[in-house]
Image: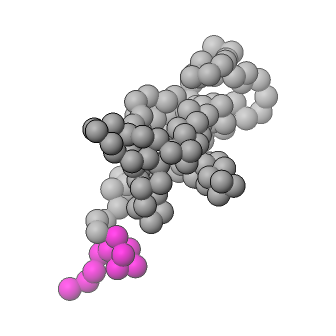
Amino acid sequence: MENKKFKNKYRIESTRLKGWDYSSDAYYFITICEKNKNMVFGDIKNGFLCITPQGKIAIECWYDLANHYHNCVLDKFVLMPNHLHGIIKIDNDKYASGFVETVFKPVSTDGANNKIKYSLSEMMRGFKIFSAKRINKL
């Protein structure tokens, strides 16, 4: 029997839809786990998450995604001790109004980059790079 796990390591097959363009306008549910599943983002105490400095960085980097990717609209987000869940909407037409509303401030969309259709994988790559660089400095 052929093993369908990637490098015999992951427990499920890819959940990506074959043939789907992940830069297409849609809502996407994201789960990102800490590399070794260590509880680096916080600890649960009395039913609440006590966020670590690493967790604060992850939150800041999540909310900063829309400042880097003009077609990224952030929806719900929750941080867990060793992973996070979030919903990202890709909206490739949102720059038509002249600026993008983000969590922190309007971002100008003038320039060549406002025509790029950033994909979900590019956004997740950026999140991981931005957060890892800052966390590794601690």
Q: Hey, which quadrant is residue 65 in on the image?
A: top right
Which residue is found at the position 62% from the left and 22% from the top? 104
Between residue 3 and residue 93, name the one nearer to us.
3
- Tell me: 52 left or right of 10: right
Quarter of the figure with the N terminus: bottom left
Q: Hey, which quadrant is residue 30 in on the image?
A: top left
Which residue is farthest top?
Answer: 97
Q: Is residue 3 above or below residue 50?
A: below
Between residue 49 and residue 89, name the one nearer to us.
49
Which residue is found at the position 28% from the left and 80% from the top? 3
- Tell me: 50 left or right of 62: left
Q: Is residue 12 above or below residue 106?
A: below
Which residue is farthest right?
Answer: 111
Quarter of the figure with the C terminus: bottom right
Between residue 102 and residue 40, name the one nearer to us.
40
Which stretch appears magenta?
1-10
Which residue is found at the position 43% from the left and 28% from the top? 75
**Is residue 126 covered in magenta?**
no
Q: Is residue 58 above or below residue 19?
A: above
